[in-house]
Image: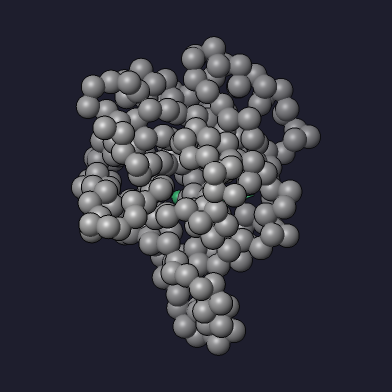
Amino acid sequence: MERETKFISFFNQKGGVGKSTLEILMASYCHNVLGLKIAILDADYPQLNIHKLREDEINLVKRSEAYQQAFASLGKPVFPIANSNPTEAVAQMDIFLDLEAGEEPYDIIFVDLPGTINTPGVLATISQLDHIFIPLIADQLVIKSSLEFGVLVNDNLIDKPNINLKTLHFFWNNVVKSEKSNLYEMTNSVIEQAGLKVLETMIGQSVKFRKPEFRSTIFPMQPNLIKDTSMIPLIEEVLKVVGISINALK
Ligand SMILES: Nc1ncnc2c1ncn2[C@@H]1O[C@H](COP(=O)(O)OP(=O)(O)O)[C@@H](O)[C@H]1O
Ligand SMILES: [Mg+2]
């Protein structure tokens, strides 16, 4: 039976490509703007960047009256961020499925994983996700390792017995349009020739992504910051892959 809750991850074998940042932004938008029921399972142990960011933000709110007022005016709880690790992530995914009777199922759980498939539990967790999205940046080493990983996953983990994973999509992050533009096109055609898929939306490089008020796990993204980042088209494209219709939500 198809699960109602979708488990997705922005995954790459390389660090620093924007996995955690883009997961936070998408989770925040889905929770605050689209009203979806969201959680993040932070299994990137021992860094736990997302979990720690939430703790830092909570401490900041506790210390500031202005933040407390802003928080109260949100009028709803924040989305949960569960602290995990790769060997326990699959069992914790089940906890999100086993809700109390009458409780609404989650729409999406974002699973943040360590950037190496050699860590025990990482491949097992990936195989139980529904969809993975692989951020690519214009760096030959990242591209090479990502394509190898994509082929490995596509050949061994998609449409196989006892495996839940349904799709894998690459997408470009940190894009500087003026430079190496044929690197993007050439890589896309290599990906497509290998029978793999690339999302249309490309996320440009922008200092906005480093701003704490943009990637907050508590407060909604400010509309002036999200504008011109392509985050909304990315989120819409991801939701389409996942099978959540935004028109139905609007
Ligand atoms: N499109 C972008 N433009 C500029 N900086 C970005 C972009 N995407 C991510 N970053 C920055 O890159 C750094 C690494 O991102 P992070 O999400 O921690 O990567 P990962 O989880 O893949 O290790 C962070 O400082 C983040 O703000
Ligand atoms: Mg990360």
Q: Residue at x 52, y 52 (%)?
A: 30
| Whole-percent x, y for residue 70 in the image | 58, 78
Specify the quadrant of the image occupied by residue 129. Answer: top left
Q: Residue at x 34, y 55 (%)?
A: 104
Q: Residue at x 71, y 23 (%)?
A: 182
| Whole-percent x, y for residue 238 in the image | 53, 38
| Whole-percent x, y for residue 43 in the image | 33, 51
Q: Residue at x 50, y 29 (%)?
A: 169
Left or right side of 143 for 109: left
Residue furthest to the right = 178
Specify the quadrant of the image occupied by residue 12. Answer: top left
Residue 89, above or below 160: below
Residue furthest to the top = 193
Residue 205, above or below 74: above
Left or right side of 59 for 118: left
On the question of residue 189 being in view, the answer is: yes
- Which quadrant is home to the N terminus? top left
On the question of residue 142 being in view, the answer is: no
